[in-house]
């Protein structure tokens, strides 16, 4: 009989997650003392929701299950990329995290951020196409069997995989939500739609494969009453259907906002035109 996994305690994962939460709450307390309305409640709620998803994906028993079931590993990754990342980005935690430090430290960090090399690197990494490409490469590269199976034997490789997925997803969602000017929002729909397509393709390849991609999961799947192929097919469906749907829903939300802005621009132009002609 399978023993239900305990909460994950990998230091390379638990410590960064804990530090992130501690810094955010410390920064939030300081910001609200200095300027109570500086951080909107909606932003805090979004960050907290994203942080809870991080806990579920990386620290809860799901993490232990991911070492035995490929489908659980896939669910873990999709929670990071398609749910936690956009929620964290919506929360705009950067300024709050900066306020976790004392004033001299904040000034030093700000000077580093303003450095030419850092600004250029950030500008490059958050350009929508580049962020889209980085995210796509991270998704496809880590599913190469040699790389994926290395995460089952090395905590460092496992932590690096999670950092790659979450970090590239944060860049991607930031570029979509904050990196595009109003006139360019139509391109966000393209990037979201193509991400949904290529992740669906990868999920379909897993679902219809004729043999398991990752032999390391054979014994783990059996202990949960699944065949290796059933476990892989379930993982493929998780990536194919709900994960791709998350990107499509985001694309529809962006399209709605884009059309609303377009209607506003047209109405403003119509309102201004008569006054100019008179």
Image (tube, grey):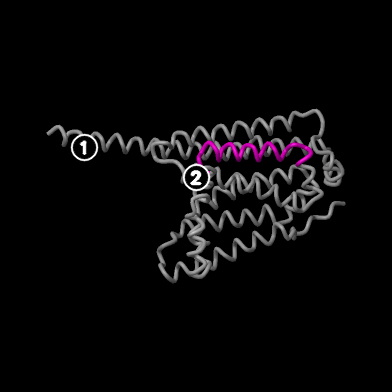
Label number found at residue 272: 1
Question: Which one is closest to the eye, mark 1 or mark 2?
Answer: 2
Q: Secondary structure at mark 2?
A: helix
**Residue that numbered label 2 is attached to:** 123
The extreme left residue here reads: 278
- The residue nearer to you, when weighing 113 against 115, is 115
- x%, y% of residue 18? 64, 63
Q: Secondary structure at mark 1?
A: helix
**186 in relation to 71, above or below:** above
Q: Provide the residue span drawn in magenta.
A: 126-147
Drawn side of residue 155 relative to residue 96, left or right? right
Distance CA(mark 1)–CA(mark 2):
35 Å
- x%, y% of residue 84? 59, 50
- Residue 220 location, quadrant: top right
- x%, y% of residue 122? 52, 47
Write the residue at 57% across / 47% down: 170
- Residue 137 location, quadrant: top right
- Residue 192 location, quadrant: top right
Q: Is residue 128 magenta?
A: yes
Q: Earlier in the sequence, mark 1 or mark 2?
A: 2
């Amino acid at each position: 009989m399978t023993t239900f996994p305990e909460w994950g305690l990998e230091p390379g994962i638990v410590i960064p997650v804990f530090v992130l939460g501690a810094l955010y709450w410390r920064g939030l307390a300081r910001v609200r003392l200095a300027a109570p309305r500086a951080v909107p409640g909606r932003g805090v709620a979004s960050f907290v929701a994203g942080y809870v998803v991080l806990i579920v994906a990386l620290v809860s028993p799901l993490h232990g299950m991911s070492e035995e079931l490929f489908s659980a590993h896939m669910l873990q990754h999709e929670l990071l990329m398609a749910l936690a990342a956009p929620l964290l980005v919506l929360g705009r935690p950067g300024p709050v995290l900066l306020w976790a430090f004392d004033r001299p430290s904040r000034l030093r960090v700000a000077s580093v951020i303003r450095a030419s090399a850092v600004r250029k690197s950030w500008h490059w990494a958050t350009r929508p196409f580049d962020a889209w490409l980085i995210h796509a490469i991270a998704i496809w590269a880590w599913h190469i069997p040699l790389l994926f199976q290395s995460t089952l034997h090395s905590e460092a490789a496992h932590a690096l995989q999670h950092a790659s997925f979450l970090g590239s997803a944060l860049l991607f969602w930031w570029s979509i939500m904050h990196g595009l000017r109003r006139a360019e929002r139509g391109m966000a729909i393209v990037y979201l739609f193509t991400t949904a397509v290529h992740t669906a393709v990868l999920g379909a390849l897993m679902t219809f494969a004729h043999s398991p991609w990752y032999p390391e999961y054979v014994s783990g799947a059996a202990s949960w009453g699944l065949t290796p192929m059933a476990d892989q097919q379930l993982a493929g469906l998780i990536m194919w259907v709900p994960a791709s749907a998350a990107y499509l829903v985001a694309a529809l939300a962006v399209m709605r906002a884009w059309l609303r802005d377009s209607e506003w621009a047209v109405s403003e132009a119509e309102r201004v035109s008569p006054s100019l002609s008179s």
